Image (spheres, rainbow, N blue to C red):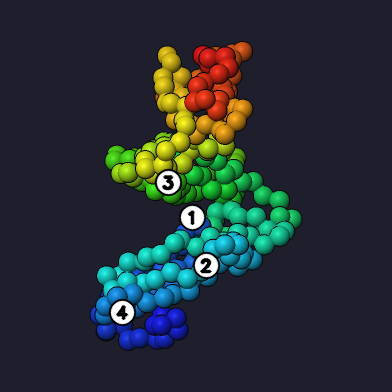
Amino acid sequence: TVSGRQICQTQSVTATTCPARNIGLIRYPTTLAPASGSVAVTTQCADNAHVRTGFSLSVRCTSSGSWSGTTPQCECNDGYRAVTVSGRQICQTQSVTATTCPARNIGLVRYPTTLAPASGSVAVTTQCADNAHVRTGFSLSVRCTSSGSWSGTTPQCECDTGYRAITVSGRQICQTQSVTATTCPARNIGLVRYPTTLAPASGSVAVTTQCADNAHVRTGFSLSVRCTSSGSWSGTTPQ
């Protein structure tokens, strides 16, 4: 793609390109990089999807062969749902009955809804939250089994430098450390892990704590606690 227009170029020509890639439902085309500066490129949503309100499909391809700009956001049209097939997100009609491995968030790791294979399992690449990266020694790859369950080692992500992990509405995100806000602090009580959580303006918000690796919640106890507007924890301590 040159200046937003696809052409056919002889394969003998060596040139810097911004590579094709898929991020969620976004399709980036292979694009010839300019000699200097950057060039605007219009990405595409997957079939049966559209760009989310407030977002643009426009990004830029730089002379170094890297993409820049805000990552576009697409969502499936009414009557469709996002599923992952062979590691690629598509929009599938909701009338199709199929076994799926459900979307879920574990810490800063995002698992996509994934169409389960007829037998065995399929590799799926999870994603880190915005402004986070995978921890050294870990992989973002997991497997979706034919039964609709996830298998494999749980990936681990951590916030980029200058950001900290907080929990908002039960979901961990990375927030710039320059933002001043009241939080309920992270803490460990026995085998229970409390995440740093953004306190609500008033009242309290439910937060799900986690057990340490290779541990589980005791019968009769819940992992749910509450973070209050004063930045303190309330509720029965999980076990």
- Residue 182 pos. (x, y %): 47, 32
Marks 2 and 4 sit apart, C-alpha to C-alpha, by 22 Å
The picture places residue 24, in percent across and down from the top left corner, at: 51, 57
Mark drawn on residue 107: none
x and y percentages locating residue 201 in the rendered image = 57, 34
Q: Name the spot of residue 30 as percent of width and height, x first.
A: 39, 73
Comparing 22 with 165, the one in front is 165
Question: Which is more foreground, mark 2 or mark 4?
Answer: 2
Task: Give me the C-alpha separation between circle 2 and circle 3.
Answer: 22 Å
Q: Which mark is residue 34?
A: 4
The Cα–Cα distance between marks 1 and 4, rounded to whole angstroms, is: 30 Å
Name the residue type under label 3.
Cys
SS for callout 2: loop
Which residue is label 3 attached to?
Answer: 128
Question: Residue at point 49% right, 67% down?
Answer: 27
Residue at horizontal 59 percent and vertical 27 percent from the top: 204
Q: Residue at x 40, y 86 (%)?
A: 8
Query: Which of the 4 quarters of the picture holds residue 134?
Result: top left
Of pointers 2 and 4, the one earlier in the residue sequence? 4
Q: Earlier in the sequence, mark 1 or mark 4?
A: 4
Vertical position of residue 78 compared to residue 115: above or below = below
Closest to the observer: 139 or 107? Answer: 107
Considering the numbered disc 1 on the image, is that residue within a helix, a strand or a loop?
A: loop
Task: Kindly identify which residue carries mark 1.
Answer: 87
Above-or-below relation of 201 to 47: above
Amino acid marked by disc 4: Pro
Q: Earlier in the sequence, mark 3 or mark 1?
A: 1
Mark 2 Cα-neighbour bin, 10 Å: few <14, some 14–19, many ≥20: some
> Of callouts 2 and 1, which one flags the residue occurring earlier in the amino acid sequence?
2
CB under 8 Å between callouts 2 and 3?
no
Pointer 2: what residue?
A: 56
Q: Secondary structure at mark 4?
A: loop
